[in-house]
Each structure stands twice: as structure tokens, then as C-alpha cells.
Image (cartoon, rainbow, N blue to C red):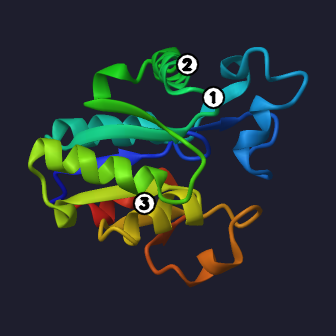
Amino acid sequence: MKKFIFFDGDGTLWYPALTRRRRAPHWIYYDAVTARDPNAHLVLTHPSKMVLKRLKAMGVRMAVISIVPGPWLRAQRILDRRVKHFGLEAFFDGIYPAQKRSDAKGRIMERVLLEHGISKRDALMVGDSYVYDYMSAVKRGIPAVLIYPKNYGSADAIRVKRRVKRMDQIMRYVR
């Protein structure tokens, strides 16, 4: 069984209600209507909370790693508020903002696993971005599952074997 699971935020745990996954989620931070208060325009993906509850009950440690634009301290505050907005803070052992670089999340995952003394094979990354979530983890030897929204996924994502349509389907990769 996996001991530590990393979750992407945008597009994985939550997404803009206006687009219903028909568009990559990061647009919400730049749109004139939604940028002032993105949290008001985000909804939890179904069934994220149920999956987090199950994993917590199983003793799995979890963290959020999400790309948040801006300086680190500001990004940390934004991501903390977003997790709290959805009432998810009790599920996570860590909340980590990442820069928009293809290797950023992988570097954070390696550091966190080292700090907790957990091997890479006992971890899992769950995200909807082929480049920033899936490949960032796999390139560092960390198993990953891609939540694949066909409408905005990378062309390379179609070849990923560990691909699911809904959050609850990740459970087959946890055991």
C-alpha cells in the first residue's frame, strides 16, 4: 500500500465551475471576472472529499502540490486559503506551492519523501497535467496517476497506462 500521496490542486482536487473541465483550469487566475476571487469560482471535483476521507482512514499521508503564480510566501498563503476554503486542511500533512516549471513538483516530492523517510515506490502523485504532474513525478522515479480530461490533455497523455477519468478510480493504484 502507498504511504504518501501527493495531489495536484487545480484540475485534480478542484476546478473552475464555469468550464466543467472543458478548459485547462489555470485560466481562472487571469480572467477579469474570476481573478479577484478565484475561490468563489472553484468547486471540488467529484468525489475528492470521499477519496481523501478513505485514504486518511487507511493511514495514508497526503499533501497538496499545486502551481500558484507569484512569490513563494504569497503563493503559500493563497494555497493555504484555498485548501481551507474547501475544508480540506485536516486531510493534508503538507501544502506546497510550486513554480510553473516542469520539474518543480518532482523536486518538492523528493524533498518531502526524504524528510519523512519514505521511499519513492511507496509514494504516488495524482494530477491532471501530463507535464507538471505526471512527468514531473515519473522522471524522478515516483509513481504517478494521470486524471485525464481529454478536452485539454497533452497529446502524449493518451499513451499513459496509469490514467483514470475520476478521482475515485485512483484507489486501484493505492493498494
State the quadrant of the N terminus.
bottom left
Q: Residue furthest right?
A: 32
Front tag of 1 and 3? 1
Left or right of 31 in this view: 166? left
Q: Secondary structure at mark 2?
A: helix
Q: Quadrant of the C terminus?
A: bottom left
Q: Is residue 102 above or below residue 31?
A: below
Residues at discs 1 and 3 in contact (Cβ within 8 Å): no
Could you tell me how far apart the alpha carbons at marks 2 and 3 are, in whole angstroms? Answer: 33 Å
The disc, 1 or 3, on the residue closer to the chain's N-terminal end is 1
Secondary structure of residue under mark 3: helix
Q: Which residue is under mark 2?
A: 74
Residue 158 in the image: above or below residue 25: below
Count neighbours of disc 2 (C-alpha within 10 A) and say few if under 14, some if 14 to 19, many if 20 or more.
few
Which residue is label 3 attached to?
169
Q: Is residue 144 left or right of residue 36?
A: left
- Residue ID for mark 1: 70
Observer-nearest of 38 and 171 = 38
Tell whether label 3 touches label 2 (CB within 8 Å).
no
Q: For the point 43% across and 64% down, which residue is it?
A: 145
How would you rate the neighbour count of disc 3 (Cα within 10 Å): few for under 14, some for 14-19, many for 20 or more?
some
User: Which circle marks residue 60 in the picture?
Assistant: none
Labelled pair 2, 1 in contact (Cβ < 8 Å): yes
What is the x, y in percent for residue 143? 32, 68
Q: Residues within 10 Å of mark 1 (few under 14, many from 20)?
A: some
Q: Amino acid at mark 3?
A: Gln
Q: Position of residue 169 (x, y in %)?
A: 42, 60
Q: Say what amino acid the circle numbered 1 marks.
A: Gly
Q: Is residue 10 visible?
A: yes
